[in-house]
Image (cartoon, rainbow, N blue to C red):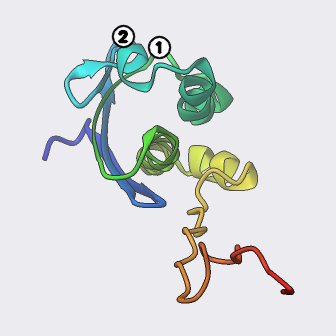
Amino acid sequence: MESNVFSGTGKRKNAIASVMLKPGKGKRLVNGKKFEDYLKSSTLIMDVEKPMELLQVTEAYDLVARVRGGGLSGQSGALRLGVSRALAQISEDYRHQLRKNGLLTRDSRMVERKKYGLAGARKRFQFSKR
């Protein structure tokens, strides 16, 4: 692997993202599509770009990512963690700032499984007294 390419893997719910950052002009590709076309929602786009905006390197690196599994929300969370981990490889100062803002911590929350005799994980069927 080239020395000026930084990679990171992020996971969130059932989504897995592998991210590559290389010095460039700020291009962003996710699964071969433009960043905005893939994520659609401006909230999700801001969520993924948060680590880069925090470090003020938005235009300094090109982002190429492959995402699979989960839905768009989980995929954006996985992308954010992948981007953060890739940025943390660049500089120890970056790592410190990202850690301080909680961007290097994996969100371990998962969907709770459905239990037998219930409508969902916790929801019950309607109770009938008679």
Task: Report the side of 103 relative to 81 (left or right).
Answer: right
Q: Which amino acid is tagged 2?
A: Lys
Q: Name the residue beneath numbered marker 2.
A: 25
In percent of the image, x 46 and y 51: which residue is there?
Answer: 85
Determine the CA span between mark 1 and mark 2: 5 Å
Between 129 and 49, the residue placed more toward the observer is 129
Q: Which is more toward the observer, 86 or 19?
A: 19
Q: Which residue lies furthest to the left in this view?
A: 1
Q: Which mark is residue 98?
A: none
Q: Position of residue 117 (x, y in %)?
A: 58, 88
Residue at (54, 24) in percent of width and height: 45
* Residue 28, placed above or below residue 13: above
Q: How many dots with numbers?
A: 2
Residue 106 placement: quadrant: bottom right
Extreme residue toward the top, this view:
25
Residue 112 location, quadrant: bottom right
Element type at mark 1: loop
The three-letter amino acid code for the residue at tag 1 is: Glu
Element assignment for label 2: loop
Q: Residue furthest right?
A: 129
Q: Name the residue under label 1.
A: 59
Q: In which quarter of the image is the C terminus?
A: bottom right
Is residue 122 toward the left or the right of residue 81 in the image?
Answer: right
Mark 2 surroundings within 10 Å by alpha-carbon count, few (fewer than 14), some (14 through 19), many (20 or more): few
Report x, y in % for residue 120.
59, 72
